[in-house]
Image (tube, rainbow, N blue to C red):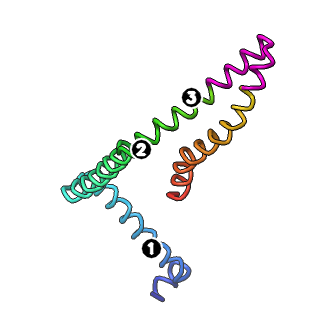
């Protein structure tokens, strides 16, 4: 290398040139390799796709268990009652019926705690689960 180093300047310049040529040839070869979709690449992609499908089926099965369905029904009943009573309270406030306003207000105080618990346990589980997966 000292002969080339003497002609071209330094040994480092020749080494950089050779490494640049090697990198260029490597990039060209990998570019041609990426143009062809081989059977090995097809099988690897097929395995990845199958794993994704299995994961999707498992998550869908978790959503349709009797436990998940009953949880949704109970949450809908409790939150629906709270929403109904809140609307009734607004109607009686508009109608200026103070007796019904105070009665429904007491009911809403009790239902608010239950509704918040339902929201926390029903929606909180999925929120915490999605945070922990990341």
Residue sitting farthest toward the top: 95
> Taking 15 as reference, is 100 left or right?
right
Foreground mark, 1 or 2? Answer: 2
Mark 2 or mark 3, which is nearer the start of the sequence?
Answer: 2
The correct choice, above or below, for 122 with respect to 79 in the image is below
Q: Is residue 21 magenta?
A: no
Q: Nearer the viewer, residue 62 or 57?
A: 62
Which residue does the numbered mark 1 point to in the structure image? 19
The structure residue drawn at horizontal position 71% and vertical position 26%, both measured from the top left corner, is 104
Mark 1 or mark 3, which is nearer the start of the sequence?
Answer: 1
> Taking 85 as reference, is 121 left or right?
left
The structure residue drawn at horizontal position 31% and vertical position 61%, both measured from the top left corner, is 29
Residue 79 at what x, y percent from top left?
58, 33
Residue sitting farthest toward the bottom: 2
Q: What SS does tag 3 mark?
A: helix
Q: What SS does tag 1 mark?
A: helix
At label 3, counting other C-alpha atoms closer than 10 Å, the crowd grade (few under 14, some 14-19, many 20 or more) is: few
Q: What SS does tag 2 mark?
A: helix
Mark 2 or mark 1, which is nearer the start of the sequence?
Answer: 1
The span picked out in magenta is 84-103
Q: Nearer the viewer, residue 13 or 101?
A: 101
Which residue does the numbered mark 3 point to in the structure image? 80
């Amino acid at each position: 290398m000292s002969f080339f180093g003497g002609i071209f300047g330094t040994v480092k310049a020749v080494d950089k040139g050779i490494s640049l040529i090697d990198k260029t040839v490597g990039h060209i070869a990998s570019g041609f390799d990426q143009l062809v979709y081989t059977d090995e690449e097809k099988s690897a992609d097929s395995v990845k796709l199958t794993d994704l499908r299995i994961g999707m089926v498992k998550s869908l099965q978790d959503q349709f268990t009797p436990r998940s369905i009953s949880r949704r029904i109970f949450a809908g009943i409790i939150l629906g009652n709270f929403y109904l009573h809140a609307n009734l309270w607004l109607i009686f406030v508009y109608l200026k019926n103070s007796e019904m306003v105070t009665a429904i207000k007491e009911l809403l105080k009790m239902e608010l705690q239950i509704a918040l618990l339902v929201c926390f346990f029903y929606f909180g589980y999925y929120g915490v689960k999605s945070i922990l997966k990341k």
